[in-house]
Amino acid sequence: MNHCLGCAHGCLYPCYAFMMAKRFGKVKTQELWCTPKLVSNTLELLDREIPRLKDKITSVHLCFSTDPFMENYPEVGKMSVEAIRKLNTAGIKCTVLTKGILPIELSELCPENEYGITLVSLDETFREQYEPHAAPLERRLAALRNLSVAGCRTWVSIEPYPTPNIIHQELLPILEAIGFANRIIFGRMHYNKIVSEYAEHKQFYNECAAEVTDFCIQRRIPFHIKNGTITEAKR
């Protein structure tokens, strides 16, 4: 479910959602993309769609091509909570992924919901460069931790993970910081020529994937390595 056109975060990985929206003529410029437009009749649309599709829905994800809790757009976050509540009332669980701040009121909704953040670094300088208008990393992480303490199911997407020529960092501190989460997803960075300029990028991602796998197995945390992250060695 994408109840906004555009996203204010302005991520420069580059942003796949912006690339696709521009390719298919939904938006012309990065500037327009970073000025999101809320679908004001979202709840009315749900009232029509839920009865028609309820039996076919396993869960609803917020969001794929925008952010349900983007910084400085409280009307988006309010609509997201109201939509999740409406879906839950119909017996439909929701999954959420954000680079914003997850509100603690989500803990009052369906216990089957799953709340996630994207976190690819603990370095705020990196965040300011590549996710310039997203929520600060520590605040993002603290909000997720608060939901976890409140008994909610939480998850973290470490994607798109940058190569050392973009930022030199250790992966383990990130894993330790999110070790409370119920699930961890890891994936490489795509569509960025700087990654391919790093001669050992295939080996790097293989090693990172192995580190995530080992960490999660040791902590008994369910995990998923995204397709294309691991490169099979040629024989």
Image (cartoon, rainbow, N blue to C red):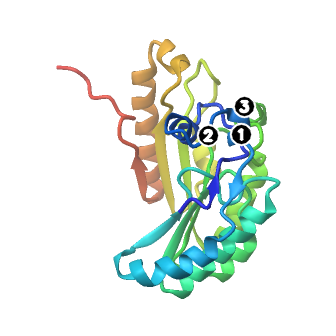
Label 2: which secondary element: loop
As drawn, 168 above or below 84: above
Quadrant of residue 87 within the rendered picture: bottom right
Asked if the residue at tag 2 contacts the one at tag 1, i.e. Cβ–Cβ closer than 8 Å, the answer is yes
Q: Position of residue 218 (x, y in %)?
A: 44, 53
Mark 3 = which residue? Answer: 126
Spatial CA distance of label 2 from label 3 is 27 Å
Q: Give the mark count.
A: 3
* Gap between marks 1 and 3 measured at Cα: 24 Å
Q: Is residue 187 left or right of residue 177?
A: left
Q: Secondary structure at mark 3?
A: helix
> Residue at 69% of width from left, 67% of height from top?
40
- Residue 179: give x, y in percent of width and height: 58, 55
| Quarter that holds the C terminus | top left
Q: Residue at x 71, y 50 (%)?
A: 36
* Local crowd size for mark 1, using a 10 Å CA cut-off: few (<14), some (14–19), many (≥20): some
